[in-house]
Image (tube, rainbow, N blue to C red):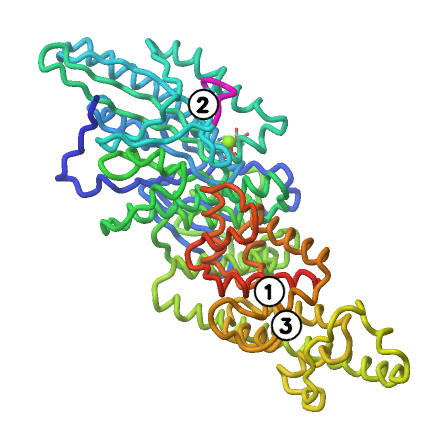
Amino acid sequence: MAQRVAVNEGSKRTSRVRVAVRLRPYMDKQDDKGEGPCVRGLGPQKLEIINWRNATETLQYQFDVFHGEETTQQEVFLTSVKPTLPHILNGQNASVFAYGPTGAGKTHTMLGSQEQPGVIPRAVREVFNLVGAQEKGQDGWEYSVGMSYLEIYNEKVLDLLSPGSQDLPIREDKDRNILIPGLTHTSLSSFADFDTHFIPASLNRTTASTKLNQRSSRSHAILLIKVVKSQRGPPHRQQTGKLYLVDLAGSEDNRRTENRGIRLKESGAINLSLFTLSKVVDALNAGAGGRVPYRDSKLTRLLQDSLGGSAHSVMITNIAPEYRYYFDTFTALNFAAKSKQIVNRPFVRETLLAPTIAPGKRAREEQEAGGSSEPQTKKSKEVKKAEQSPSQSIHPHGSPDSSVLERLLALEKMMMGSAERERLSLLQTVAQSRKEIQMLKEKQKELEDKAKMFNKQSEATESESKDALLFKTDLPPLHRKQSTAAKPRKQQAVVTPLQVSQVQPLQQCALVCKPSQLLDKKKKRVQTEVGEGKENGGVDPGVINWESHLDSALLEQSRKKILQTLNSGSLKELKSLQLIGDKKAKLIMGWREFNGHFTQLEDLRKIEGITAKRFSSFIKANILSSMGK
Ligand code: ADP
Ligand code: MG
């Protein structure tokens, strides 16, 4: 078996993933409002993006390399890729992957066009050049070059050189080399030979779907170039070097686009792979020797022997300058960077003033001149204008929609130092508590109004048959709390309507069972009130009782609905289930990636940490909640 060769241990940086950022030129044809770019370069390693929290600040990031808008394909190749290639001929592995939101230039960087070939054709040509030079030099070794080309789509490994093939397994041999049994491997004799195999296979990929862009932006395309080096004479040693060239799926948050059905499943799977990739890159760059979670997704499992360790890895993060990419650019930069700096200076939009000049050029000119030559008053006007623009769905100056804001906060929290993190967490808790209080106040008022109305109704109908009020005559009356009506304390007020009618209680349950996930204690307390009494350890006997009160068809329907959410819900949708927080939602997503579908709700019990008691509470809370909606 051909062996991999470890990199000289003298170099401590071998397991790091080098990070380059490439900003593509501004090209938003829809930008008739003249919004200009939201990000720009500051030098060979630095860039800045406007701070969404505060328009008078920018966020500055530093990377191993920054490729500005005018960087050519050749320059990207020479700086970020070419230096890694000689290692492939020495039995070492390497990986180059393009990361970033759809439309930011990943495919342009990796594949390019006939006129502007990208990393893939340049790297393959260079590998043949290097092999040719070695063979000419007669170094006593023989080289053979081959390729495989595959796609990871929906966590399935598909062979692009053999269209129609099934999901392929990923294995590891005793030397810790990653293998894919059954994957086509084609020998290549020259660069022209590569072209004849690669081009039709690329077409296979893009024409496999009617909505080709949708699919290609949701799958990871992985080209493997393998160089096997064999000693001509005894002891006939053999070494294998692998080069992975990866055009990753778009890193944009698909939960924001209203994905449904299959696409919802795709985004879940992609998020899992990219999420795991981010954890792997983080773990490698932290360099603490801790666990690297390669096994948590197909993508990272496949790249395990070529990402980190003794391999040479480069990530080219592609970003777009237009405002409509702001959120995705911000998240991509945070994925790529370990640290950032907040700088107190406004991001002035030069393009508003002179849209004919390339924004990158202006930024550079400004930088060279030591700052903008525009008068300060003009500057602040521009910033003001930016603050007022209502056109962005993710507007860093105005108020972004609450889910985006929440995630920006969460992301920032994740990225910050501990002092900042505490301050932020405090602010967030205060904001959340305010929201909670407001919500509870509104509900209290609403329920008090309803209680008043029902009291009036019940007085009026007291003499009539009680059955007339009942939703189902065969249902026993629900729990009554006689004393609560008289004392409208907060929590009691929430429960009040339960005593009045059989039609209302489920709706109130839904309200009561939906407090913020942050306020777990409160949630538990309120739910206990709604339930049949205190939980008393083991399986909650209340489960049996409360279910028997409900119509079996409705019960079945709501169980189905919950099962559907478990099987195809996004992280956010899973978290909207009662008693499912971030951790459990991720465990559910992970379970379904590896085990397929939940066939019944009881399968949830197979997930770590979901005990019989928790499962009962989960079922109860969610059924009551879904029936009440
Ligand atoms: P992605 O693969 O990330 O979705 P693409 O590579 O398809 O993005 O790029 C989107 C568009 O932008 C394409 O039309 C592409 O040609 C163009 N583009 C991307 N990067 C550059 C660049 N550096 N220079 C010129 N055009 C670019
Ligand atoms: Mg692409």
Find the magenta span and give its range.
Answer: 161-166
Distance, label 1 to label 2, CA atoms, is 45 Å
Q: Does mark 1's beta carbon lie closer than 8 Å to ligand 1?
A: no
Q: Is mark 3 within 8 Å of ligand 1?
A: no
- Judge left or right: residue 12 versus residue 315: left
Q: Which mark is residue 620?
A: 1
Q: Position of residue 174 (x, y in %)?
A: 23, 31
Left or right: residue 3 compared with residue 357 = left
Q: Quadrant of the N terminus?
A: top left
Q: Residue 381, labelled with which disc?
A: none
Residue 429 point in image, percent of width and height: 49, 72
Q: Residue at x 49, y 51 (%)?
A: 588
Q: Position of residue 244 (x, y in %)?
A: 35, 28
| Viewer-nearest of discs 1 and 2 | 1
Helix, strand or loop at label 2? It is: strand
Q: Is residue 18 left or right of residue 113?
A: left
Q: Which image quadrant for residue 294?
A: top left
What distance separates the C-alpha of mark 3 from that of mark 1? 13 Å
